[in-house]
Image (spheres, rainbow, N blue to C red):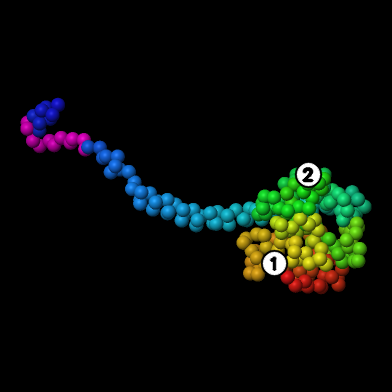
Amino acid sequence: MLMNMQFFEQVNPQVQTTRPAAFPSARAAAFTRVELLVVVGACLVLAAIQIPLLGRSREPGNVAVCANNLRQIGAAMLMFSADNDGYMTGRSYPRWPLLLLPYYRQTNVLHCPSDAAKPSDFGTGNTNYVGPRSYLFNGFNDYAGPDWGRAFSVPMRAIKYPSETILFGEKYTDSGHWWFDFNQYDDVRELEHARHFDGSISTGKGGSNYNFADGSVRLLKPGQSFQPVFLWGISDESRGWFPIF
C-alpha cells in the first residue's frame, strides 16, 4: 500500500496525498488534575451566584400562592359565619383549622410555600392538627376585653371596617399559636412581618400577606398592619393603638 502511494506521488507530483494523523495519546487528551479543579471551582462559583437568583425568581410565585391560600381560608371563615348565625370560629375546641376544614377542604392551603416544610403547630399530635400551618387568626382581644382567654366567638357584624380589619396573618415558623393576641405581645413573639422578598423588621423591607374581613388579601410591609391604623382591632379606640416592636 505504501509503495503504491509513493509511486502515485512520483507519477503525479502535482497531487499531494494526505495521510491520516496519528491519534493523540490518551494522556495528552486528558484533563490534568489542576485543570479539573479549575473547572469544578468555576462551576461552584456559578452555582453560588445562580441559586439565590433562582430563589428570588420563585418568590413572586410563592407570594401569589400564599395570597390565594389566605383568600381561601378567609372565604371559609365567611362561609362558616354564614352557617352559624353570623359568628366566626371561637376560642374553643376544636380549633379553627379543623372547624373550617369542610369549607376550604384542601389542607395544603394552610401552608405558605415560603415557610418551612413543617412549621411549629400546637395541634401536632392531636385531633386539631390537619396539616402544616403558616397562618394565625385574629384573637380580637379588644372585643373580648378581660375575657379574651375564654371561649368566645365574634360576630361578623361587630367588624365596622371589613376592608381594613385583618382576619388572618402569617406566623413565625417556630410559633405554634392559632391566634394573634396583641395583649400578649404577639406582634413580637408570633407574627411574621416579613416572610417574603428577603424582608426583615429591622430593614423595613419585604412583607407578609394578610386576609381582611371583606375577603381581600394584601401584602403589607413590616409594621403596616399596626401603623398608621391598628388593623387587628375592632373598636375605634384600639385601632389607634400603636404597638412597639
User: Under tag 1, what secondary structure?
Assistant: loop
In the foreground, 235 or 123: 123
The reply to whether residue 24 is in sight is: yes
Q: Position of residue 46 (x, y in %)?
A: 46, 54
- From the image, which quarter does the C terminus lie in? bottom right
For marks 2 and 1 on the same chain, the one whose residue lies earlier in the sequence = 2
Asked if residue 220 is positioned above or below residue 114 in the image, the reply reads: below
Region rendered in magenta: 10-21
Q: To which quarter of the image does residue 163 belong?
A: bottom right
The reply to whether residue 231 is in sight is: no
Task: Tell whether label 1 touches label 2 (CB within 8 Å).
Answer: no
Type of amino acid under label 1: Pro
Which residue lies at the image location 8% right of the left edge and 29% below the top edge?
7
Q: To which quarter of the image does residue 172 belong?
A: bottom right
Q: Position of residue 128 (x, y in %)?
A: 82, 48
Q: Position of residue 34 (x, y in %)?
A: 35, 51
Which residue lies at the image location 65% right of the left edge and 59% below the top edge?
196
In the foreground, 26 or 51: 26
Which residue lies at the image location 64% right of the left edge and 64% below the top edge?
199
Which residue lies at the image location 83% right of the left edge and 61% below the top edge?
139
User: Under tag 2, what secondary structure?
Assistant: loop
Mark 1 highlights which residue? 222
Does 17 appear in magenta? Answer: yes
Q: To which quarter of the image does residue 14 belong?
A: top left
Mark 1 neighbour class, 10 Å CA radius: few under 14, some 14 to 19, many 20 or more: many
Asked if residue 67 is positioned above or below residue 227 in the image, the reply reads: above
Mark 2 neighbour class, 10 Å CA radius: few under 14, some 14 to 19, many 20 or more: few
Mark 2 highlights which residue? 105
Does 194 appear in magenta? Answer: no
